[in-house]
Amino acid sequence: RELAHRNGVGPPRCSFVNADLRRGGLEATLQASGSFLRLVHGCRFLDVDLLCRLPHLLAPGGLLIWSTFQDPSDDSRPLAPPFRASRRLRPGQLSAMLGPGPDGAGMHVLADAQGQLLTRGQWVPASFFVARRSPGG
């Protein structure tokens, strides 16, 4: 909000809503306003059900930018959290879920890269993903 305020950006071009993403609050808010998201950014957070719903909430041409933890490439135990496999992605999982393939959501994948995030003083594997909803919706 501070960044938008400092740059003189406000309604209707930019608005902020508090919604419970895990319980359908975002969908209800968007339905009530009749609008779609133009940009979604998530970092260090994994909720596969939410990620599968996001493409349908994006406006045509809207962007999804996501980064979160990934399984170690050598199948070793992670050196730092998250330790539960359900909190980490497999390599290529977002492209498979959200991309153009037969099981995907049909988004155009702009980047699907592996890197690292620092957590508790340890560098751990991470996934960095960017996709655009088709301009035709």
Image (spheres, helix red, strand yellow):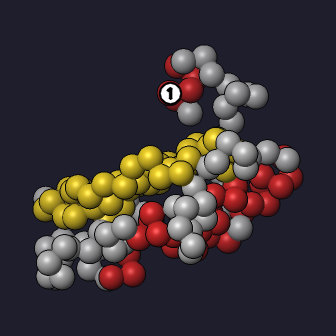
Q: Quadrant where the N terminus lies?
A: top right
- Can the viewer see residue 5? yes
Which of the two residues, 93 or 44, is positioned nearer the viewer here? 93
- Can the viewer see residue 46? no
Please tell me which residue is depicted at 37% across the width and 55% down the height of the picture.
112
Q: Position of residue 44 (x, y in %)?
A: 37, 59
Give the quarter of the image for residue 9. top right
At numbered mark 1, what does the secondary structure look like: helix, strand or loop? helix
Residue tagged 1: 3
Drawn side of residue 29 relative to residue 7, left or right? right
Give the quarter of the image for residue 57. bottom right
Drawn side of residue 44 relative to residue 38, left or right? left
Please tell me which residue is depicted at 14% across the width and 78% down the height of the picture.
74
From this view, report whether residue 103 is shown above or below residue 41: below
Q: Position of residue 97 (x, y in %)?
A: 51, 69
Q: Position of residue 109 (x, y in %)?
A: 47, 52
Which of the two residues, 43 or 64, is positioned nearer the viewer here? 64
Please tell me which residue is depicted at 31% across the width and 65% down the height of the picture.
69
Please tell me which residue is depicted at 68% across the width and 36% down the height of the picture.
15
Drawn side of residue 5 relative to residue 122, left or right? right
The amino acid type of the residue labelled 1 equals Leu
